[in-house]
Image: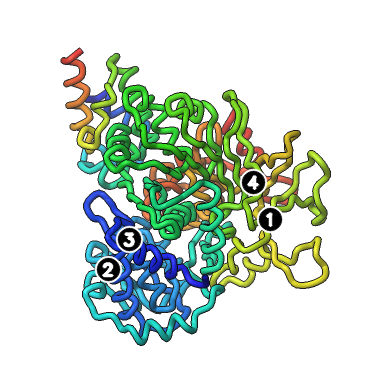
Amino acid sequence: MKNILELLERAARVDEGKTAYADEENALTYGELMDKAKAVGSALLRVGRNKPIAVMVKRGAANLKAFLGVVYSGNFYVVIDEQMPTERIHTIIDTLDPAAFVVDGACLEKARGMEMNLDIFVLEEMEEGEENEEGLKKVRREMIDTDPLYALFTSGSTGVPKGAVISHRNVLAYSEWVCETFGITKDTVFGNQTPFYFSMSVLDVFATLRAGATLHVIPKSYFSFPLRLLTFLKEREVNTIYWVPSALGMVANWKALDAFDLPKLKKVLFAGEVMPVRQLNYWREKIPDAIYANLYGPTEATDICTYYIVDREFSPGESLPIGHACNNCAVMVLDEEGRPAKEGQEGELCIRGSFLAMGYYNNPDKTKEAFVQNPLNPHYPEWIYKTGDLVRYNERGELVFVTRKDFQMKKMGYRIEPGEIEAAAGAVPGLRACACIYVPKEKKICLFYQGKEKPEEVGAILTKRLPSYMMPDECIKMDQMPLNANGKIDRKELKRQRDY
Amino acid sequence: METLMEILKELKPFVDFEKEEHLIDEHILNSLEIMTLVSRIDDEFDVQIPLVEVVPENFQSAKAIHRMIVRVQEEE
């Protein structure tokens, strides 16, 4: 197998009338999805080959027609979230220089308003068009499994988002591991929480395609309203979920499962941030016969590189291990000198194998920093990816996450680099210095700044420049920023002052 | 209403709660904030907002939140 479209075509052959992807209002069968994606692909043939195509489609099943349509055309897709602030969309588009911009009717207005010099293609118009069978066939014959499938933008420490390029081979290898490990079959029904611009959604989307399963896209607002969420899961007979811990925690904090049972739910997977044990225990108590698994990995390893299936009791205060490497993926724990860390010592988690991204799009410098020659292999070229996460092995031989190597932050499962928030704060006219820190205990992002603006003025400017999950929860005005011996802003001191 | 406005201002200092009518649809309040809000309301108004009241319609605006509080108070 060389192309993810083979997964789609296989599923359509097996059962073309089966629902593949659905949302609150619409459902797409495998047969429809394939036909529409081919029509979309035919319309996009003229833009070229192996080029990035930006896709901005309202959250829902229709996204899949656009993604797979782009793939049929021999290009790769980049998801743009309609709710991203225009500034961030511009930064991504500038890095990407896409060959086309695919939007649905609902996003057309916004796309036109952005005044970017891009060829706009409307999804609803393309999917009604004719299939160019010859054209699609020719493209497919020429494609190889290391061709890019999509690029996914993560937050960059210099304030510029980085686009990890993921190939067909990456997703074929990764989805194979997912289906084997968690027994994903045609009977699986996913309840999708993570947005399509987030690497976790790759599991839901492509495990569904590989197994010929069904995926229901859950509306975002349901995650604020527990009974509505659980009712949706029950009505759609969802049996597998892969959510960020904050979403699982929401259900636990409301104790929503006290009065509501989900007899069909059998698999509860999570990743993206640390799963608090208290909330996990609530789920395990209410749904004792489900499998629970803690997954760990960066976007640069497609989604996940290690996992731990919960097999024992944990008490609050203990942390869940991140476990062992996935099948067909290898991890190494390396010290500062690039040697294997000594037993029980912490080191940087590094990844090698077929899950590894091809690099960052149009960003050779960042690619060189993160994707390096395997220091344990001096014999032939072999890339590893340095995650920047510090880990160690526990006494059971399981990997345990210790901390981020730099000051990177995670909130609600989103990776947030302080640099990006600081870069946005740079837009505040009278701002002289700023530094952003994260207070994990309270899950708060704090922006310290020195300048003449009042905190609410800084906040108002940031609201226009940052997606809501990146917004500082506190803006703290300082008379003087503390500096360390190197003359850099002393973040440790700021943390100390914040905690008093 | 005043107490509610104070709670809201404390939660989201940069939002104009007098004007906003689509706090949920516009994703102005996230799930954590709604949870914090409900527990602050429970404390300040000495009520317990039942789970069945935690639906989008009741959180779209300060007015809607206030109506819900009054309703729950009357029912108790």
Residue beneath disc 2: A113
Residue beneath disc 3: A15
Amino acid type, residue under disc 4 in the picture: Arg
Determine crowd level at label 2: few under 14, some 14-19, many 20+ residues with C-alpha closer than 10 A: few
Residue beneath disc 1: A330
Chain under label 4? A
In front here: A23 or A409? Answer: A23
Circle 4 — which element? Answer: strand
Amino acid type, residue under disc 1 in the picture: Ala
Q: Same subunit under labels 1 and 3?
A: yes
Q: Nearer the viewer, mark 1 or mark 3?
A: 3
Amino acid type, residue under disc 3 in the picture: Asp
User: In the picture provided, is A173 more to the left or to the right than A119?
Assistant: right
Q: Nearer the viewer, mark 1 or mark 4?
A: 1
Circle 3 — which element? Answer: loop
Chain under label 3? A
Residue beneath disc 4: A404
Separation of residues labelled 2 and 1 (CA atoms): 46 Å
Q: Nearer the viewer, mark 2 or mark 4?
A: 4
Circle 2 — which element? Answer: helix
Residue at 17% across / 15% down in the picture? B75
User: In the picture provided, is A264 more to the left or to the right than A402?
Assistant: left
The answer to which of marks 2 and 1 sits earlier in the sequence is 2
The answer to which of marks 4 and 3 sits earlier in the sequence is 3
